[in-house]
Image: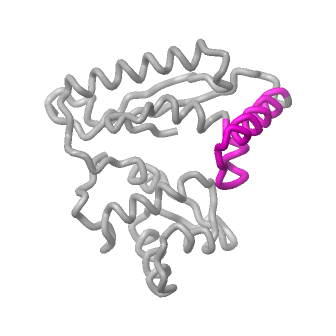
Amino acid sequence: MRIDPKGEIAGWPALFVRRTLRQLSTRPTWGLCEFDSVTSLDDPRQRRALLKSLRAEGLIEAAGGNAWTITQAGQTLSSATAARGVTRATAQRALQQFLDRVDLVNSDPYFLGKVARVVLFGSMLKPEVERLSDVDLAVELTPKEMDPGRARTRNYERVEELAARGHRFRNILERICCRHWEVFGFLKGKSRVVALAD
């Protein structure tokens, strides 16, 4: 998905909305305090107006109590690109590099997760489209260690190892899902062309 970097979504700058959703997308649910901290809006009325706009657009929804969650449409928007389109040849190269990284993840014992399935979707499947916004890929990850207790222990050890090297985890969810996000980060490979969905 591509967004206009100078456009608006629900009356707010598109890049601001995307950044807000990206920061919230690392949490399965979040509350108003977390929402306020990621928006960086000083005026509480503006924060409430933004929350109302995102809900009206179907990008977020109430999750019970005082909790909120991002919808599938919000997840899609959070990973949208604002960059210019790429040629089909460039997209094909990016896809092949991604698949090479999948092979490396699955064969390298360093990674605690493995790629069980990859699904290509979006504009790359339309042969009539020559300039693509990005290469949209959905990835299913599974732990390499099948025993849940040992998988948790290995994940905890990786968290400690990364923390000792200076990595800062923003919250407990990032620690619990370290195995998952470490693999996703490697698969993305800093490519502006590849857009990953979980």
The secondary structure that most of the magenta stretch takes on is helix
Query: Residue visible at 69% across and 50% down?
Result: 173
Left or right: 145 as drawn, with respect to 99: right
Q: Percent position (x, y) of residue 108? A: 61, 15
Left or right: 62 as drawn, with respect to 112: left
Compared with residue 174, is residue 51 higher up or lower down, i.e. above or below?
A: below
Q: Percent position (x, y) of residue 10? A: 33, 71
Compared with residue 83, is residue 146 higher up or lower down, i.e. above or below?
A: above
Q: Is residue 53 magenta?
A: no
Query: Residue visible at 29% across and 37% down?
Result: 134
Q: How many marks?
A: 0
Q: Is residue 165 magenta?
A: yes
Compared with residue 175, is residue 93 higher up or lower down, i.e. above or below?
A: above
Furthest residue to the right?
A: 149
Which region shows up in magenta? Answer: 150-178
Colour mode?
one colour
Compared with residue 24, is residue 42 higher up or lower down, i.e. above or below?
A: below
Q: Percent position (x, y) of residue 146? A: 77, 22
Furthest residue to the top?
A: 107
Query: Residue visible at 43% across and 69% down?
Result: 54
Query: Residue visible at 69% across and 72% down?
Result: 65
Q: Percent position (x, y) of residue 19? A: 42, 59
